[in-house]
Every structure is written in C-alpha cells, then in structure tokens.
Image (cartoon, rainbow, N blue to C red):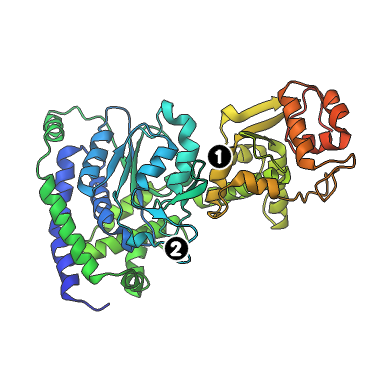
C-alpha cells in the first residue's frame, strides 16, 4: 500500500501510545499472565477504529471473585468511552448499547454502523455469569453473539404502544467478566484474560491507583488524536486493500501458524490490522491470545442455527394463536425435524446428548421443560421466539404472532386437518385450536377435549405439541 503523511503519523505516535496505555492498565490491574496486558491494550485501540473494520473481537476476563475483574473492566471503560453494566436485562442491554445506533428497517438504504455517531464504543458486563443472571443468559448471549460483525443481524423488538418495530445495531467491541464457563458460541468471539487474586505487598499500590486513578484524561486525548490520524488515512476501502494484501496474509499466518477459514484467522486478521495501523509488533502476544480462543465452536453455531430454524418451523406448522404468551413445543418433534434435514444433507444425525447441548446453547432453559407421558415438552415464551426470528435475519418480520397466525400448515404426513385451514367438522381451524388450548388450560382431559371439538382437531393439536398428552403413551 502507498504511504502518506497521515499514515506515517498514526504509525509514528502509535508505539508510544501503546506502551503508555499498557503501563497505565498494569498500574490498575495485576495481569496473572503478563502477555494479556498487550491484548487488553489492543482492545483499547480497537475501540477507536472498529468502525473501519468488518468484525470486532471481544475480551472475557476469567477469574475467581476478588481477582480484580471489575477493576479491569472499569479501567477499560474509562479509556474507551465505554459503559460498565452490571445486573441488566437483555432489553435494557439492547437499549443501552443501542443508543445512537437506531436503524430504520424500512429504509431503502440500510444504515452503515461504521457511520453511526455512537454514544458508547465499548460495552463492559460485570459478573456476567452470576447466579442472578442465569435465567437471562440465553437472550443476552444471543445479543452479544450477533454484535461482533459489522453486518450482523440487528436487535429488533416490537413496540406494542406505537405498533411498530424498533431496531438497533449492536456492533462494537465488548468485554465481560466471568468466573466459570461461557456459552461456546459466545466464547469464540474473543480472547480470555486470566485473573487471579493477588496478595503481594506491591498489590496495595494497585488498590490505591484504582481508588485514585491518574493520567486517564491525557491518555483519552492521545487515543483520540491517534484515531483522528488513522481516519485521515484509512477508509473501509483502504482497510480492505490492506487485509487482502499478500504482506498482511503473512502477518496473519505468523500469528496463527496457517491460513484458513476459521475464527482464529478472523481474529488474527483484525488484530494484525489494528497493529499495523499503530505501527507495533506484538506477534508473540497475539499468538498467546489465539491459544486462549475456544475451539470447535463453528460447528456449534451451525447446529444452533439448525435448531432455531427447526424450532420456528415447528411453531409455524402449529398455526399458533396471537393471544398466546407461551408456546408448548414437543422436544422430540424438533429433534426429528433437525435430523431429517441433516440426513438430506448427508450429515450425521444429532444424538440425545449432542441435541441436549445444542438446545441449551440455543437458549432453551431447564425451567421451560415439562414432562408428560414419558415425553418432554418445552413451554417457550413468545418473546423468545421473536428474538430467535430476529437472529435468523428476519428484521422485517418482527410481529411473530401475526405471521404465525397467517402461516399455512404444510405437514401433510401427520395433518388430519384440511389444507385450507378448516376441519372436516366445520369451522375455522384457528378458532377450534384456540378452543382446544383454552380447554387444556382449564384442566379438561383428552377425552373431554375430543368430544367437544372432534377427534381430528384434537389430534392435530396433540401431534404438533400444541398441548401435551397427560398420561399413557403417545400414539
């Protein structure tokens, strides 16, 4: 690539800035693994230039309570114009990170997140895997997984009061503190930073530096000046030119050992680009970072998407009603549909253990599982299904209930109901299904339901898992 005064400036001031930011971070946090300090410093630089990049990497600060994880997140947020968030709901997370990132879904020219005047440039999440947040992790993991790509699916919600959709682009670097394991698909988005309690005498100075941080304003100003120099030279087109060059491919290969289509090469490419912008050589530190990445997560992500597609397909086949708050789904039906599709693609079917791993990773919570007649059913909130539909790149179809009402069932193998949405005993199918569901909620038994609405409609509901059979074996 050709050089310029602006490029020379950002590469000239970059090494000194990198060194000083790293030293400042080390004064506020004891890095159990010294090379981690360079990764965190690179993250700080990334927060200034990520809007020029196709993807952003995350950081996960892993350690026991009392190891200083919160202090590190707070220091990162201060330098990065970021926001440190604690106990937060998925909806609040989306609104907070989405400030300044509103998207008009009906626009003929989609908003480019690289041109958005975002309020925050780093989202930090403290105690991410705490006991109090366990029930919210599925939705939160989904939000974070889809916020690391510039062109990732937006977060979409339906505003019931205004009767219209609200969408945010959540693309930005993110960091989280955790004490145990992370969702595999989420963990593959970034590097793990090791944290451990530190009881040595010099740790007292770290404590004081956290209570009375100095030098932050000067570093923030210098980071902004470096970012201005980068933007004077680099555009998304120039970044593409850099990343497609043979010289840059060699830099990535030196970090990962070999070039390939995987998350390691993707993160190494992002890191190498930022390092090149700053004129620094941290190959050894980046090699260390690559070794911290979780492996074999691409398959998990593919299977999670297969699961979500199958789940929505089963739900739509059931012609669910708009008034429902939850949907009862037969677990075996979802597994059967996934494996049917996998057989058509010559893929190995999912066994029971693997299927359980995938549906938990996809957000099906243990509290949703119900046992009936030796079979498992999931009582899935409609809000979760809306989120899943958004993750499957359906931003213009956020009113899931309405779409499911209008969907025409296509499962002829088990459908005893007419293809036009009526049953042989007359009457709209939707009304009769609604009546079946209400009778089940009222506690009526299978025989009573069949006498009231007819055998065909009752079997239609049972076979699709709309309502579970109580007692006995399934037919």
Residue at 25 percent of width and 61 percent of height:
275
Q: Quadrant of the N terminus?
A: bottom left
In the image shown, does 185 or 365 lie closer to the viewer?
A: 365
Q: Which comes sooner in the sequence, label 2 or label 1? A: 2
Distance in Å between CA atoms under marks 2 and 1: 25 Å
In the image shown, does 252 or 412 lie closer to the viewer?
A: 412
Q: Dividing the picture into quarters, in which one does residue 124 lie?
A: top left
Report the number of discs.
Answer: 2
Residue at 73 percent of width and 46 percent of height:
317
Q: Residues within 10 Å of mark 1 (few under 14, many from 20)?
A: some
**Image coords of residue 266 (percent x, y):** 40, 59
Q: Give the vertical position of 473 relative to 214 (above or below).
A: above
SS category of the residue bearing label 2:
loop
Q: Dividing the picture into quarters, in which one does residue 376 lie?
A: top right
- From this viewpoint, which residue is outermost toward the front? 162
Which disc is residue 384 wearing? 1
**Image coords of residue 232 (percent x, y):** 21, 69
Query: Position of 349 compared to 368: left or right?
Result: right
**Image coords of residue 338 (percent x, y):** 68, 47
- From this viewpoint, which residue is outermost toward the bottom? 2
Query: Position of 286 compared to 75: left or right?
Result: right
Q: Give the vertical position of 446 relative to 293 (above or below).
A: above
Residue at 24 percent of width and 79 percent of height:
2
Query: Position of 333 compared to 304: left or right?
Result: right
**Image coords of residue 273 (percent x, y):** 30, 64
Q: Is residue 126 visible?
A: yes
Q: Residues within 10 Å of mark 2 (few under 14, many from 20)?
A: few
SS category of the residue bearing label 1:
helix
**According to the image, label 2 marks what residue?**
110
């Amino acid at each position: 690539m050709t050089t310029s005064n602006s490029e020379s400036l950002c590469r000239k001031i970059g090494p000194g800035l990198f060194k000083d930011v790293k030293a400042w971070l080390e004064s506020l946090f004891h890095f159990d693994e010294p090379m981690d300090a360079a990764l965190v410093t690179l993250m700080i630089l990334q927060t200034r230039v990520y809007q020029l990049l196709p993807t952003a990497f995350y950081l996960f600060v892993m350690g026991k309570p009392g190891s200083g994880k919160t202090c590190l997140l707070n220091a990162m947020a201060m330098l990065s114009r970021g926001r440190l968030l604690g106990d937060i709901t998925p909806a609040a997370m989306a609104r907070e990170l989405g400030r300044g990132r509103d998207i008009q879904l009906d626009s003929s020219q989609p908003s480019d997140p690289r041109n958005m005047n975002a309020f925050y440039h780093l989202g930090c999440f403290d105690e991410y895997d705490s006991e109090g947040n366990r029930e919210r992790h599925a939705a939160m993991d989904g939000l974070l997984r889809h916020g690391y790509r510039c062109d990732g699916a937006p977060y979409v919600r339906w505003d019931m009061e205004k009767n219209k959709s609200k969408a945010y682009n959540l693309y930005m670097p993110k960091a989280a503190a955790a004490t145990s394991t992370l969702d595999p698909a989420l963990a593959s988005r970034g590097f793990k930073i090791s944290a451990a309690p530190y009881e040595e005498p010099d740790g007292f100075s770290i404590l004081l530096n956290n209570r009375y941080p100095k030098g932050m304003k000067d570093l923030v100003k210098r980071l902004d000046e470096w970012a201005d120099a980068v933007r004077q030279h680099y555009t998304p087109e120039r970044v593409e030119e850099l990343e497609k060059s043979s010289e840059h491919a060699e830099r990535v290969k030196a970090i990962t050992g070999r070039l390939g289509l995987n998350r390691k090469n993707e993160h190494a490419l992002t890191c190498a680009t930022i390092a090149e912008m700053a004129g620094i050589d941290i190959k050894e530190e980046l090699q260390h970072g690559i070794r911290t990445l979780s492996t074999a997560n691409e398959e998990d992500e593919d299977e999670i998407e297969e699961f979500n597609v199958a789940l929505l397909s089963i739900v739509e086949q059931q012609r669910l009603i708009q008034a429902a708050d939850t949907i009862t789904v037969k677990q075996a039906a979802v597994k059967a549909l996934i494996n049917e599709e996998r057989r058509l693609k010559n893929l190995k079917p999912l066994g029971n253990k693997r299927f359980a791993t995938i549906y938990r990773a996809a957000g099906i919570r243990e509290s949703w599982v119900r046992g009936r007649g030796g079979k498992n059913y999931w009582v899935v909130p409609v809000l979760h299904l809306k989120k899943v539909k958004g993750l499957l790149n359906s931003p213009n179809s956020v009113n899931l209930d309405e779409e499911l009402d209008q969907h025409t069932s296509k499962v002829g193998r088990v459908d005893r109901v007419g293809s036009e949405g009526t049953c042989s005993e007359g009457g709209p199918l939707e009304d009769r299904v609604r009546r079946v569901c209400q009778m089940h909620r009222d506690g009526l038994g299978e025989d009573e339901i069949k006498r009231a609405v007819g055998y065909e409609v009752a079997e239609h509901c049972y076979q699709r898992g709309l309502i579970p059979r109580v007692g006995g074996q399934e037919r």
